[in-house]
Amino acid sequence: MEKIKMTTPLVEMDGDEMTRILWKMIKDELLCPFIDLKTEYYDLGLKHRDETDDQVTVDSALATKKYGVAVKCATITPNAARMDEYNLKSMYKSPNGTIRAILDGTVFRAPIVVKGIEPTVKTWKKPITIARHAYGDVYKATEMRIPGAGKAEIVYTDEQGRETRELIHEFAGPGIVQGMHNLDESINAFARSCFNYALDTRQDLWFSTKDTISKKYDHTFKDLFQDLYDAEYKEKFEEAGIEYFYTLIDDAVARVIRSAGGYIWACKNYDGDVMSDMIATAFGSLAMMTSVLVAPDGTTEYEAAHGTVQRHYYKHLNGEETSTNSVATIFAWTGALRKRGSLDGIDELVEFAGKLEEATIETIEGGTMTKDLALITTLEQVNAVNSQDFIKAVRAKLESKM
Ligand code: NAP
Ligand code: MG
């Protein structure tokens, strides 16, 4: 069988610990035998980030901007313990934060749904993707403890020195205040990423805020989304047969629980933080969550939502057997290959991505899975396997489809 050819390289960001081990297994067993894999490789492993003073992270993000599609392995975000462990020159920032700042993107988190790993909510049949706005609000707020009686105001001073004031509260005794902000530019970029991703994945887009109570702040989010939709996306959505709709967050929560899934739910920063943990937990497993960073210009980076699985890595270094779930990392690759294939018009690559996803899902549904899933599955015949044997089982299924 001839290998599938690629025309444009995929930006490949290698990472750390157990996921770095899985990364190589996935390439050796599931990708390279079938694809003439063309990547521009960046080693984001902590050792190499340190050697390059983290320049490699910046370079990988710039390459992603250039080529449009990247796939990323989980990476260590250094803390004090890591400073000692890797003898680092500096406590580098989170690579995901650095990449997100350069691409100005929105993160979409979606669960991989398989039979046998049942969501807590019985009506959910398809994934629910959460899009979280990653700028401002309470995460960039200024707070003040009010010691006693007095007046608190918001003051805006324009460039000519003119002041506009709004009373927050006339305090009769001690209390608290908080000042938050957001930017039209950031909200528009968020909206654009959401509309693009909905079109890309052909899913409806829901957006919710509390605009009935927050008549200026949240209402601005609602208006900016609607304006951009009307100006640039309405026709495209109609052509794609998908829907954009705005609803109050209380209503959204109730609808989500009654829904069958299969849509994107865009949330403000705090709502997205809270709701993504709820959705992830209710779908069954962190090891089955994917994460996609989408920039307003459509640039896309795919990864697993989980970390480097440090505890398993230390077992691996001790020569012990591990049973680490590689599914989200496999899906990071299939997402990136499908996107690359569709941008370059390479149907074989798009089809390959679909077959590899099917092979992975069918392997689990057939009862072969890693220990984390074996513990929670509703299937009766279960064959719990180690990291390597799971990937080999997927390979066997994949070969039967090629
Ligand atoms: P983690 O790597 O997500 O793992 C936490 C625990 O969740 C594991 O010990 C394991 O539980 C379970 N788990 C997660 N993924 C799994 C998988 N694929 N298969 C089986 N079990 C899985 O989080 P962490 O241990 O808090 O963080 C480790 C490192 O990852 C940190 O240095 C952190 O900075 C980094 N991190 C990176 C990213 C990223 O690059 N996107 C995201 C989060 C964290 P058991 O031990 O009980 O088996
Ligand atoms: Mg959270």
Image: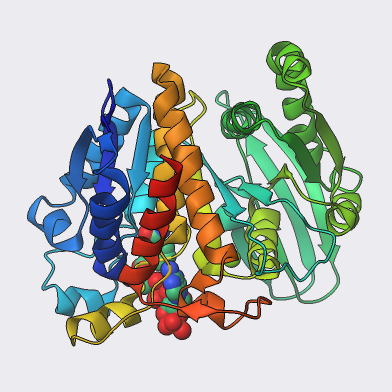
The spot of residue 32 in percent (x, y) is 24, 43
Q: Is residue 200 left or right of residue 331?
A: right
Image quarter of the N terminus: top left
The spot of residue 99 in percent (x, y) is 35, 43
Q: In this view, does 48 lie above or below 224?
A: below
The spot of residue 103 in percent (x, y) is 40, 34
* Residue 314 visible at all: yes
Give 2 or 279, whichever is nearer the viewer: 2
Q: In this view, does 160 lie above or below 194?
A: above
Image label count: 0
* Residue 302 visible at all: no
Which quarter of the frame holds ligand 2?
A: bottom right
Q: Residue sitting at 40 percent across and 63 percent down?
A: 393
Image quarter of the C terminus: top left
Q: Which colour scheme is used?
A: rainbow
Q: Residue sitting at 57 percent across and 28 percent down?
A: 185
Give 76 or 305, whichever is nearer the viewer: 305
Q: In this view, does 31 lie to the left or right of 348?
A: left
Instruction: Give the image quarter of residue 11.
Output: top left
The spot of residue 333 in percent (x, y) is 39, 45
Instruction: Give the image quarter of residue 253.
Output: bottom right
Q: Residue sitting at 23 percent across and 75 percent down?
A: 82
Give 380 or 119, whichever is nearer the viewer: 380
Q: Residue sitting at 37 percent across and 32 percent down?
A: 69
Which residue lies most toward the left here? 51
Q: Is residue 47 above or below residue 342?
A: below
